[in-house]
Image (cartoon, coloured by chain):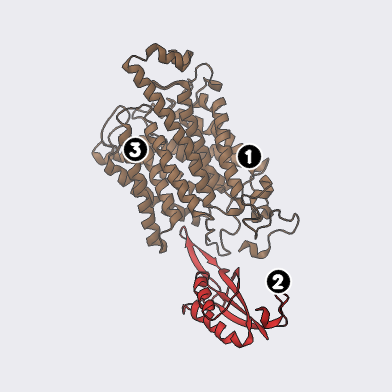
Amino acid sequence: MVKLVTAVVKPQMLDAVKEGLRAVGVQGLTVTEVRGYGRQGGHTETYRGAEYVVDLVPKLRIEVLCPSENVGRVMEAIRAAAHTGKIGDGKVWVVDVEQLMRVRTGELGAEAT
Amino acid sequence: MAVLSGGSAAFAQDASTTAEAVQTNLDNAFVLASAVLVIFMQAGFALVEAGLTRAKSVANIMMKNLMDFCAGAVAFFAVGYAIAFGAGNDYFGSSGWFLGDGAFQYGTLTVPVTFLFQVAFAATAATIVSGAMAERTKFKGYFIYSLVISALIYPVVVHWNWGGGWLANLATPFHDFAGSTMVHMTGGIAALMGAMVLGPRIGRYGPDGRPRAIPAHNIPFAVLGTFILLVGWYGFNPGSELAADGAIGGIAVTTTLAAASGAIAAMLTIWIKAGKPDVAMAANGMLAGLVGITAGTAAVSNVGALAIGTAAGVLVVASVLLFDRLHVDDPVGAISVHGVCGAFGTIAVGLFATEDTDFWSQGLLYGGGVGQLVSQVIGVVAVAVFVAVTAGLLFLAIKATVGLRVSEEEELAGLDVFEHGAPGYGPDVTPMVPAVPIAGAGTAPASGRL
């Protein structure tokens, strides 16, 4: 059984998350630049003395495919690495993957992670 | 003189053995090099204005800067130089059209060197305006403005003073060494008129009327442009001595001190006001100090230069915030930097001039009375009113004929593709912005106004 672990984290935490995932044996991941907001709804900054609202805050989305028995360790590795305790640390969620295939070899399921 | 009739080669042969000939050649070489430095300021303006505005209209702002110089060069050659410096009356010169018979030459300088230095200044006045009108002006309308300011408005102002007109003939002559009023305030007031006739950019003010910042797209451009302007100012101010003599070093030092103190003062002012040392505002502060010292650069002491620069740095921040509140949207601060600090720097000569000379009288703070101060105020008010009326009418006439402001759809999409056919940054660099906005795909979505 394969799971897709998706995390949205602060961009500056990428290196720490990569290190953490490597330490628990994750061999591949995909990173996308995204923007969004959560409960806080963004924040305000000033430019030339006038305020502006940053309502879509830049984030990175990290996607990891792993066998279901590893999900707990992968989630904890991301949490530990991306955690600052401040608003905007992000989220991690997991969904079932119905099927997974490695393009080069045709391997299926957990073999392909 | 050989200079007027023959070429420079013949001139050099005639007289190369005398000390005067060496000095003459030195003067011409120095002022020509200064003119080139002033022309380099165009690159500084282009980068400052591009940096402080948004990526979606960056090609447009670059094009306006490119054409300000080109329109300025052609228009000033054809008619502007004759109106500014030709023989005429107190208000208007009228000889030397197309650099022909009667074209002006200053002192030991040749006609071409005098002209090149002055055309560089004309183009500077013209290009000040493009930033204040950024991101919402029709290019065609802007180009017409650019031709008219270099052909008519700026030359008339210059004739009043540098061309030997009525400001130069006051009992205590008006003194504007390198153009705080002539160049910078002229551009700044025209910028004010343009921004007022246009109205603010969509989204610049909230439904409650409070100003909302539209952040710069490239602060490195803005700071690099500011440094280029600083370097160019070493042509602008020392070059305005119009001779390679002992005064140019002191002028370069007052210029430096005002630039530095202006940036520091603006940084501290916005830091106290808004909580952070805003980079764009500090850059404005350096330019404010430079504009402020330009009138009195030869007349004030080093301490005076620090005082003028510091005051200009505080003033530019206060002015930017004030115009923001008045709903005059000036994306780059040109009105405050060039208009307000140009007026201030000119008036400051009447306060800070250290002694009486043939060209200026001692300022009030040094015990010289109010004579120079009054002349400075007269010059500032007269030029401000003249430029406000002429530039205001010009922009209203453009608005009523070819149109001054782009459509709402175009403004939201960015001017680059609509006005010029291609984006400033191609779709491979800015994939989120469609290279070609879909025509008729509806105007402003509600969210686009926020």
- Relative to A107, residue B79 above or below: above
> Disc 1: which chain?
B
Point out the residue furthest to the front here.
A105
- Count residues near mark 2 (Cα–Cα under 10 Å), then give few for <14, some for 14-19, many for 20+: few
Count of all numbered marks drawn on residues in the image = 3
Q: Which residue is mark 3?
A: B252
Q: Secondary structure at mark 3?
A: helix
Point out the residue furthest to the top here.
B14
Q: Colour of chain A?
A: red
Q: Which residue is mark 2?
A: A104
Q: Residue at x 55, y 39 (%)?
A: B391
Q: Residue at x 53, y 33 (%)?
A: B153
Both labels 3 and 1 in a single chain: yes
Which of B163 and B383 lies nearest the eye of the viewer?
B163
CA–CA distance between discs 3 and 1? 41 Å
- Relative to B42, residue B333 above or below: below
> Quick check: B215 left or right of B404?
left
- Count residues near mark 1 (Cα–Cα under 10 Å), then give few for <14, some for 14-19, many for 20+: some
Can residue B110 be spotted in the picture?
yes
Which of B335 and B37 lies nearest the eye of the viewer?
B37
Q: Quadrant of residue B397?
A: top right
The disc label shown at residue B397, or none? 1
Point out the residue furthest to the left here.
B367
Q: Colour of chain B?
A: brown
For badge 2, the amino acid type reads Arg
Q: Earlier in the sequence, mark 3 or mark 1?
A: 3
